[in-house]
Amino acid sequence: MTASHVCAVDVGTGSARAGIVDRNGTMLGRAEHPIAMNRPRTDHAEHDSEDIWAAVCHAVRAAREAAGVTPESIAGISFDATCSLVVRDADGGQVSVSTSGEKRWDTIVWLDHRALAEADECTATGHRVLDHLGGVMSPEMATPKLMWLKRHLPHSWNEAGYLFDLADFLTCRASGSIERSQCTLTCKWTYLAHEKTGWQQDFFKAVGLEDMLERGQLPGRASPVGTDLGPLTARSAQDLGLNETCRVATGVIDAYAGALGLLGGFAGDQADLVRHLALIAGTSSCVMALSPEPRSFPGGWGPYFGAALPGCWISEGGQSVTGALLDHVVRLHGAGGNPTPERHRAIIERIMQLREAEGLDLAGRLHVLPDFHGNRSPLADPHALGVISGLTLDASFDSLCRLYWRTCVAIALGIRHILETLNASGFVIDTLHVTGGHTKNPLLMELYADASGCTVVEPLADDAVLTGTAMVAATGAGLYPNLVSACAAMQKRGRVRKPDPEAWLRFDRDFRVFLQMHKHRQALEAIR
């Protein structure tokens, strides 16, 4: 029997998902399993990589069972994951990254902001690696986290034998290969893939990490996305319930898998690429734009060469909290309670009722800046704070609904802010391709079109991240000669939503207020 299926694994902030996909990109079965997070201090977030691997194995086995296919039919597997940092000792054992000292917490989660001071130090170097980071180092990158680890947990640093981005840890666990992905190293580790010498040792020396490459057993060159890293090891095949003939392809960061799933099908027409933007929206929101030549934009990460499609540049922006901000608003309000999916649905249903009476002017004097966890793009200010203007003494459920609605408006206006910055930098984006948890929120999906003025395309099946990872797996397994071919063959259609011109005019006024609020916040911060 010819193996013609692949397994895609997506490790997010709170769970691991797995999908079994055929060579045409059709999802045959998928499953999900939760992963644990430790929050010992404010701004600290940690995972247990063994817990993650166990969740992955559980999800893969369940997905294959749901798909009704045999282990022998799975030709390849690949992993996408959050850009979290995994530390292992020279024998592969866990090394603590936690102030608690517990070895099981060996992974600093992507959203962890413990290294704000170290990130500022990186920015102060003015090194040219910052040219691909919007000029500002984020605490979500690997470098400041490693600086923090070396300074605050020197025993753990000295014990470290391997340093991995989470996707690379998973491919290593699966195949035994310690190669690293061009996606992870280029996007999060200041590796310059477009240059002959990718690692910039003078930068690492300037920030006290001159021993990082040796300490972490990091390779001199990164492996292109879709590279075959070899077959599953006997142990990992047993763990995953797959066959040892299954090939392992280089991993990617989760948002970049989403970009491949949403935009990869346009790779054959590179001139058209600059019209499309991928929006991967869940706990946070990430926007991805592809182009045939390098195009940077203020507050954006990139452009990164070959971090998604070979020969293409990709630029990334985003909002640090979006779905998590709506959860926070529910918790914050006296009428909110626990932000369960059912609670969100009840709030959204009531907003729809209120809008029938009040229209788009619902809570029109209530304005929100959604920067409760900093501003990733386009301001690149991790210290930015959220703002709410226009509150009254009303503490009813309806007042919660009004605040929730206007927070949704603010999230959509933040996307418009990023869009306008991209288009001022040479893009001509007029189409948003949206995937992630936000597709389940009808308010946000409506607002992404109406507040941005863009056509919005929503996948008919919300599997863009898994589909992108499946494209990578199919390439590594040899089902297609290259990643561009895999993307073209496995892409899926979406549901199209056009913006309402009248609504756009209403939200254009809100956008002018939005920009003015940014100026007012800056003015307040400047007062000494």
Image (spheres, helix red, strand yellow):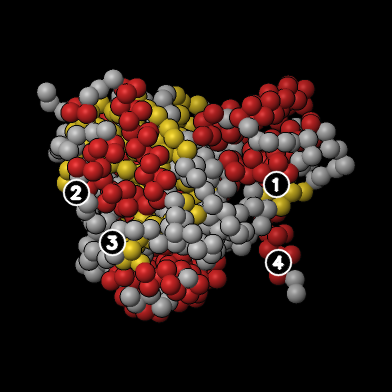
CA–CA distance in space, label 1 to label 3: 50 Å
**Between 114 and 256, the one nearer to me in the picture:** 114
Horizontally, residue 315 falls left or right of residue 454, namely left
Say which mark, if any, is on residue 525.
Answer: 4
Looking at the image, which is closer to me, 373 or 145? 145
Is residue 108 visible to us here? no
Name the image quarter holding residue 278.
top left
Of badges 3 and 4, the one in the foreground is 3
SS category of the residue bearing label 2: strand
Where is residue 497? Give x, y as percent: 50, 26
Which residue is the site of mark 1? Answer: 368
**Residue 132: which quarter of the image?**
bottom left
| SS at mark 4 in the image | helix
Mark 3–mark 4 distance (CA, rounded to whole Å) = 49 Å
Kindly report the distance in space between the C-alpha atoms of the residues bearing marks 2 and 1. Answer: 47 Å
Q: Residue at x 84, y 38 (%)?
A: 395
Q: Are marks 2 and 1 in contact (CB under 8 Å)?
A: no
Q: Please indicate whether residue 107 sits to the left or right of residue 307 in the image.
A: right
Task: Identify residue for label 3.
Answer: 91
Between the C-alphas of marks 4 and 1, the distance is 17 Å
- Dot 3: element: loop
Which quarter of the figure has residue 466? top left
Q: Tell me residue 527's x, y (percent).
A: 75, 71
Q: Position of residue 305 (x, y in %)?
A: 30, 56
Q: Are marks 1 and 3 in contact (CB under 8 Å)?
A: no
Q: Which residue is mark 2?
A: 229
| In-front residue for pair 278/451 | 278
